[in-house]
Image (cartoon, rainbow, N blue to C red):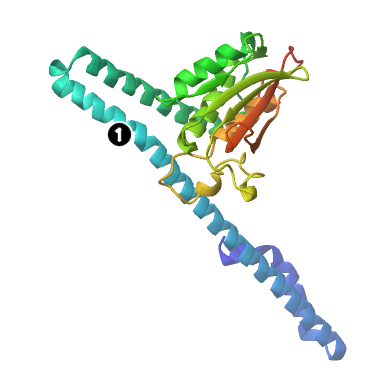
Amino acid sequence: MRGWQLIAPYTAVTALFLTRLLTSTGSSLILNLATIGVAGLVIGRQGIALRERRELLERQRDDLVASVSHELRTPLTGIQGYSQILLEAGDILSPAERREMVETIGTQTTHLGRIVTDLIDVARDRLQNTRLHRSDYGAAELVREAVAAAAGGRQVATELDEEARVFADTDRIRQVLVNLITNAVRYGRSKITVVTRIDNGANVFSVHDDDDGVPNKYQHTIFERFERGAHKFDSAVGGSGIGLSVGRDLITAHGGEIRYRPSDLSGGACFEFTLPATQPSLPDLVGV
């Protein structure tokens, strides 16, 4: 904000004080001088606050660009590399080698699609226009599908209640699970476990890893948009900081809750969300 824009709202008041100052004497002069001094301090402090806000927004923008650029570059590099190999040397590769490269391209394309989906969701202003398409589905099957999409070759253990069923938009709940499992694969060391259970009439999904967990000072902000916790200033670490925010909005729209807690299975992080076990009476638009 330019200087003249900052002082414009105070122009009339300033002119009035100056007029009174020129016509005042004695104690009235001192009072008017003090009033003008206080007004100057207020204007100056607002200018400092606006500058600090602008600088913060610029830092957040730069952090987001660096993070998203890294996140997009990684799958694009894999897709480009394997595609080039298949084009130039596909005839001399064995069927197993070609299949492995095609599968890798497919996995990286899926990952890239998830990033783009999250960005689009954020651009829709916290999913306000996203319609949910609910259906009855097995909770265990949802988890197996999400693990297949997100594990990326890592071993992911499951403890599933085969009887549990959810009434939900399965694509959106799968999206949430894929994001949580992807985070566990990215930050965990070796032990990742996905658990489903029924607790007090609600379906509970939890994703555990054996990393160090989320530091205390980030546990209350980790679900905010673009928040990357301890990695917020490290563009070398993957993650755009939007997956958990999108997940929170989607789970809330389903009548559930999502939270972080220390893992009692692996000693690291546990991200856990609940969904009603019965069909809730909820609107079909996220955020309504």
Residue 206 quadrant: top right
Residue 151 quadrant: top left
In the image, residue 37 sits, relative to residue 54, either above or below, namely below
Residue that sits furthest to the bottom in the current view = 26
Looking at the image, which residue is at 86% across and 88% down? 27
> Residue 283's spot in the image, x, y percent?
72, 19
Local packing at callout 1 (Cα closer than 10 Å; few below 14, some 14-19, many 20+) is: few
Residue 111 in view in this figure: yes
User: Looking at the image, which is closer to me, 241 or 16?
Assistant: 241
In the image, taking residue 145 as reference, residue 216 lies left or right, namely right
> Residue 124's spot in the image, x, y percent?
57, 31
In the image, taking residue 88 as reference, residue 223 lies left or right, namely right
Which image quarter is the C terminus in? top right
Residue position for label 1: 77
In the image, residue 57 sits, relative to residue 227, either above or below, namely below
Which image quarter is the N terminus in? bottom right
Query: How many discs mark residues in the rendered view?
Result: 1
> Residue 18's spot in the image, x, y percent?
74, 79
Under mark 1, the amino acid is: Thr
Disc 1 secondary structure class: helix
> Residue 203's spot in the image, x, y percent?
69, 19
In the image, taking residue 238 as reference, residue 133 lies left or right, namely right
Residue 47 quadrant: bottom right
Looking at the image, which residue is at 23% across and 18% down? 97
User: Looking at the image, which is closer to me, 274 or 34?
Assistant: 274
Residue that sits furthest to the right in the current view = 27
User: Looking at the image, which is closer to me, 21 or 114?
Assistant: 114
Residue 119 in view in this figure: no
Looking at the image, which residue is at 60% across and 47% down? 215
